[in-house]
Amino acid sequence: MTPPAPRHPARAWLIAAAVLGVALLLAACAGHEWSSPQALYRALAGDDSLCSRLLLQWRLPRVFAAALVGALLGLSGAVFQGVFRNPLAEPYLLGASGGAALGATVALLVPLGVPQSYSLPVLAFAGAWGATALVLGVSRVAGALDAAGMLLAGVAIAAMLGALRSFLMLALSDETVSLQVVMSWVLGGIQTPSWPGLGLLAALCVACLLATSRIAHGLDLLGLGTRAAQGFGLDVARFTPVAVIVGSLVVAAAVAYGGLVAFVGLAAPHIARWMVGPLHRALLPASALTGAIVVTVADAIARSALPPAEIPLGLVTAVAGGPFFIVLLARRLRS
Amino acid sequence: MNLLLEAQHLGVSRRHKSILRDVSIGFGATGSVAVIGPNGAGKSTLLALLAGLETPAQGEVRLGARRVVDVPAAERAQAIGFMPQHFEPHWDLVLEELLGMRLTPPRGKAPAQWPTVDEVIARNQLQAFRGRRWSTLSGGEQARVLLATVLATDPPILLADEPGAALDVRHRLTLVEALAQRGRTRLVIVAMHDLDLAFRHFERIVVVADGRIAIDGGEELIHAALLDESFGVVFDRIGVPPGVMLRARLRRQAGP
């Protein structure tokens, strides 16, 4: 899977950080109308023209939001691959994203008598956690803890959750919540946040990074196999549910801000593993960084490919990530 | 004798089939013990129970004064090294990463007496494998690396579940000798299939058959008739001075 060359983590981190910088710059220039880096500089320097204000109020927050959502997606993928010990595991494929989306749809469309700003994150988390626990439970009961069995259980559950969500959308949307708003979000789309909103998202990202760093060593041990992990001192029965909860939190955050974005959670950890090796202390932040790069670029494409319209981000990542998944699957089946 | 590890009246069944029935056995602080028996006799289950990795339906395993399942996992890992039957890391680790995992307790700091990764590599002469990935090691190298990793923290007890099963003759012999050697100063319990190796190298032989301990004793057991019965074969005992070797024959069925 991984190339036999020795790893150079320090160099890899530097390169990845530089790539992210370039990606952010390019994404800030991209849009229905291309801006020059000079225009960006003028906007940041406090220029008061309409163009500068648009850049500052709309484009830049969106670019950063895309990077942060990408970081959450990459991180969630790394946690899922670690918990399920399956390089093909991904929150989108295993139904966790679908669960979060169902929870969020309920919060958006069903009048619950609770402010949406509370109900949406809570229900998104409940959905992500419920779906993940269900996949884990089903594959355990069926005795299919291998990669393929678990993926099939996940795909089945994701399909059911998706159908349920579509039904809710058709049955409950009205003039107050237009179907199109929900639809564009479900297909994967990053809303442009205000700067304080962006600050909240950034804080959430930091919290997720800290939370996942607490389970990094446990994920390492889990990768040795259950028996060996126990022998090395990990209480597997206690650790796994905790890790699932942490992973679901990250998925819920990613879905709440970015909708259903496929395959980033799959690809980012693979690229990160190739960069910094399989130990989660480095792999988790590296996956977040890789995810940020991927989504920054994908979102720039989504915004600028078909002006003045915007293509859903989820379509861009699916078109690019699908072949990646197929290659991984083929390799795995062959070995 | 003061027992370090003790099983009392262990019983386990799975899917209405009993795996172990009323197994009681004790182990002192030192000694090399080979656990032998036919497939499905309950050797692996017995080892997992002794290691505290499974909870028995009946009876209990005591580690010193406590029930082994009550000992927190991290502390248990310091007292008992466990070599699983199958060890296939899901990620392609290099030796240093693997050793680092063993030498980092899940919580808190490593005890001061634990060696560093470099010390373990030097002590076991593993320098050549330092940057190698697990998948590039041969079976014999993997066994050597795994043993060194499990023993890195020098646990008082080592439980190994058929560690040499997939190895060629020379590597299996090397491994078995290393394990038996360790039994002089620590407790080593090894489940294995190779009877001649077991009788030649281990001080104590425990034969598990049909969920019970059929025989428990020293190398003189090689002559016990119960041995043949436990394995369901007839053994020819061939004198190879100074010892005896076993050659198995299938039992003749009586009648047509």
Image (tube, rainbow, N blue to C red):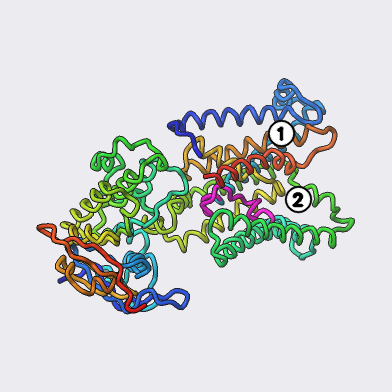
Q: Is residue B32 left or right of residue A255?
A: left
The spot of residue A161 in percent (x, y) is 71, 60
Picture mark count: 2
Q: Which of marks 2 and 1 precedes in the sequence?
A: 1
- Nearer to us in this view, A111 or A296: A296
| Distance CA(mark 1)–CA(mark 2) | 23 Å
Q: Mark 1 points at which residue?
A: A60
Q: Mark 2 points at which residue?
A: A186
- Nearer to us in this view, A36 or A258: A258
Give the letter of the chain under mark 2.
A
Q: Is residue A77 left or right of residue B70?
A: right
Can you name the residue that lies furthest to the right here?
A: A175
In magenta, the rendered stretch is A81-98
Mark 1: amino acid = Leu
The answer to whether one can see residue A8 in this image is: yes
The spot of residue A204 in percent (x, y) is 61, 48
Main SS of the magenta part reads: loop
Q: Quadrant of residue B249?
A: bottom left
- Determine if the magenta segment contains residue A191: no
Local packing at callout 1 (Cα closer than 10 Å; few below 14, some 14-19, many 20+) is many
